[in-house]
Amino acid sequence: MQFLLAFIVAAPLLGSAAALLPAPPGLKGKSPEQAVLRHGVTVTGVILAAAVALTLGFDHDTPSRIQATTDISWIQALNVRIHLGVDGISLPLLLMTALLFFLCALYSYFKLPTGPSPKAFVALLLVLESGTLATFAVLDLLLFFLAFEMVLIPMYFLIARWGGAQRQAAAWKFILYTLLGSVVMLLGLLLIGVTAGTFDMVALASDNGRELSHTTQILAVLAIGIGLAVKTPMWPLHSWLPDAHTAAPTVGSVLLAGVLLKMGTYGFVRILLPITPDGMATFAPYLGAFAAVGIVYGSLACLALARKGNKGDLKRLIAYSSVGHMGFVLLGIASMTPTGVNGALFANIAHGLITGLLFFLVGALKDRYGTADLDTLAGATGAALYGRAPRMGAFLAFAAVASLGLPGLAGFWGEMLALFGAFDPAEGLSRPAFLTYTAVGAFGTLLTAAYLLIVVRRVCMGDPKAGPELVVADIQRYEFAAWTPLVALTVLAGLWPAVLLGLTDPAVQKLLAGGNS
């Protein structure tokens, strides 16, 4: 178990370096390009297999205990240690990350985005995987920061070199926003580590902020919270996200929504809630307010993009929907209750699965029609997917109803639990304020249903004979292989939520109690 976790974090880096080397003569296949793409599928597949083995070997009877730990000294002068471990909070995120990277590598093997060298593409993809996996596995504040920052450069180049229109501007906006937020976050992490005398997240969580004064906690939450909020992204720090999603290649959008956004909300749960509880209690009402505004704002932006004649880009619409969905995650965290935090963690996983599927589908539509413009898809080309490409239409309709929170699918449980947590927030928080946030969030679910049903009606329904004669390929085998696991897991989590909640709840209870239960 100890070896498996260290292997999961380090192997993508080794695979990235190997991708840049010439392929051995016997493994080149039809071309060197095919060899390096196959290398990416192999490495991510091995990482996924290791993550599954780690999950099977995990002691599910004690998910609140940190398992598969590695703890060795790294920088003695600063008391920084290479400390790795997983519990019921981080294990689902680790497994989902490994799965999404494997599916993206598989998809890219058959549909490589237009850009420079495939070697560079695979190498950057694997560096990105290592950074995201490390973020969910490290238990030292400075290591967390390094892993948190490690993803920026590969994602910047994936957008800037393999993206679509306006990719340079979108890539610069992405990296400037996240870098500025990270600089502020580093100051907060250093403040905690220097004041408490340790950067060990387990020791700090067990101490539950007793070594940190109220002023220190407030300053730390403000600084770290800004950096995490940018990555989440929280309204009004979200403006980099729609541009990045619109310009990114399909797999870039899938990973950005499915994995990178989760790093921000994970930081709130893993660092701020247990280490600075008093500071979080001070800012929780404001965090809840921003979350509630983000839910409605994201939904209204999607409604505007979905309206006929507005030339709304479907990728941009799904990006704005992420602002709303992540608002529910932040609202659950702001409640500071086990119910709300469990809902936030569940919504994290659900959003990664469902929105990852949506971006895969929109990318496939754009490949077939040459555009993601909603008016074009619904009008001139007569998309009418139910008639032209019925399987793709069914997949898109499924992803849409899952995203709007249909009971029986994964999207329902996270949003419902987040609203329940806000309905009865932690002791000391203003219940009237959180009741208001609950009402606003519930209204947001109606807006979400409205814009997603409009999208389904405009893209999937209609008379396929009304548009020009256009042959549209239905789902290909490689697309079916990449998308079906996301569909299956969305149904599984929706029908059997205890699969996730049984892992997260004991760990959340312990985290909020300062390691005492």
Image (spheres, rainbow, N blue to C red):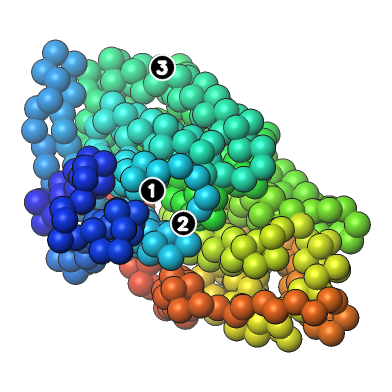
Nearest to viewer (mark 3 / mark 1) = 1
429 is higher (above) or lower (below) than 109: above
| Mark nearer the N terminus (3 vs 2) | 2
Horizontal arrangement in the rendering, residue 295 relative to residue 499 (left or right): right
| Mark seen at residue 112 | 2
Q: Position of residue 255 (x, y in %)?
A: 46, 51
| Mark seen at residue 118 | 1
Mark 2 touches mark 1? (CB < 8 Å): yes
Name which residue type carries label 1: Pro
Residue at the image point whose x is 34% and y is 54% from the top = 33
- Extreme right residue here? 309
Q: Position of residue 294 (x, y in %)?
A: 68, 44
Between residue 481 and residue 195, name the one nearer to us: 481
Mark 3 touches mark 1? (CB < 8 Å): no
Between residue 207 and residue 387, name the one nearer to us: 387
The secondary structure type at the circle numbered 2 is loop
261 is higher (above) or lower (below) than 33: above
328 is higher (above) or lower (below) than 470: above
Residue topped by disc 3: 187
Picture quadrant of residue 189:
top left
